[in-house]
Amino acid sequence: MGLSSEKLREGLDAIAAIEPRMGAALARAGYPEPRLRERGYATLLRTIVGQQVSVKAADAIWKKVDAAVGGIADPLRLLAMDDEGLRAAGLSRQKASYGRSLAGLVAGGELDFAALPQDDEEAIALLTRVNGIGRWSAEVYLLFAEGRADIWPAGDLAVQIETGRVMGLEGKPSEKLTREIAEKWRPHRGAAAVFMWHHYVTEVI
């Protein structure tokens, strides 16, 4: 599971103690709610299903695929389905390919969600072996499903925008600058990321 309310508070308080602008933003927006996901294959598959569609559409597709394969949580069931069956359930050819890539790595034992590398970069490298899973998706999985405390998805647009706003910058910082700004927030950058999404929604500035 992701970072708990207690862990978010601890992390954000630690950052606020060394970064007054973050402290001021925290005072305005308040603490964010946890973003929690179940660990494992189904959560990453759900990420693939939800790519480039609305939450409502993703939910509908997920239910149809689950019914079509007779239990979406089992990777072997997805691998046993042909492309026509998956397309009939709402998956595009590309997403069906991505799903097969994930299911194949899990079923073959090459990707074990219970034994991901402890090093964040190594874990990201392993997750991005799945076709259709880029760095951002891997980072979000590690933050929301594993609760890794120092994940910082600097390539996320909302994280970039809110980092710029919180830090009083002119315009949106680049991914490189967003990453550099957060270096001094280690090892609590995961809490900072969750706060940036919270801040983006609250539009307090």
Image: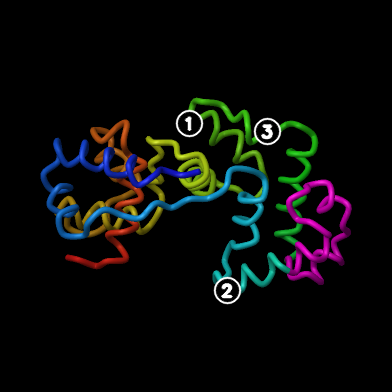
Identify which residue, 169 or 102, lies in the foreground. Answer: 102
Residue 122 percent across, percent down from the top left: 54, 28
Part of the protein shown in magenta: 64-91
Q: Residues within 10 Å of mark 3 (few under 14, many from 20)?
A: some
Decide whether the magenta segment is chiefly helix, strand or loop.
helix
Residue lying furthest top in this view? 118
Q: Residues within 10 Å of mark 2 (few under 14, many from 20)?
A: few
Question: Residue at point 36% right, 41% down?
Answer: 190
Residue type, numbered disc 2: Lys
Q: Secondary structure at mark 1?
A: helix
Q: Which residue is mark 3?
A: 112
Q: Secondary structure at mark 3?
A: loop
Identify which residue, 83 or 109, lies in the foreground. Answer: 109
Question: Residue at point 57% right, 47% down?
Answer: 38
Judging from the image, the colouring scheme is rainbow
Q: Which residue is mark 1?
A: 120
Earlier-in-chain disc, 2 versus 3:
2
Closer to the observer: label 1 or label 2? Answer: 2
Earlier-in-chain disc, 1 versus 3:
3
Q: Residues within 10 Å of mark 1 (few under 14, many from 20)?
A: some
Q: Give the answer, above or below, for where 82 lies relative to 56.
A: above
Disc on res. 38: none
Report how many numbered discs are placed on residues in the image: 3
Residue 191 percent across, percent down from the top left: 33, 44
Residue type, numbered disc 1: Asp
Residue 169 lies in the magenta stretch = no
**Cα–Cα span, label 2 and label 3:** 29 Å
Q: Are marks 2 and 3 in contact (CB under 8 Å)?
A: no
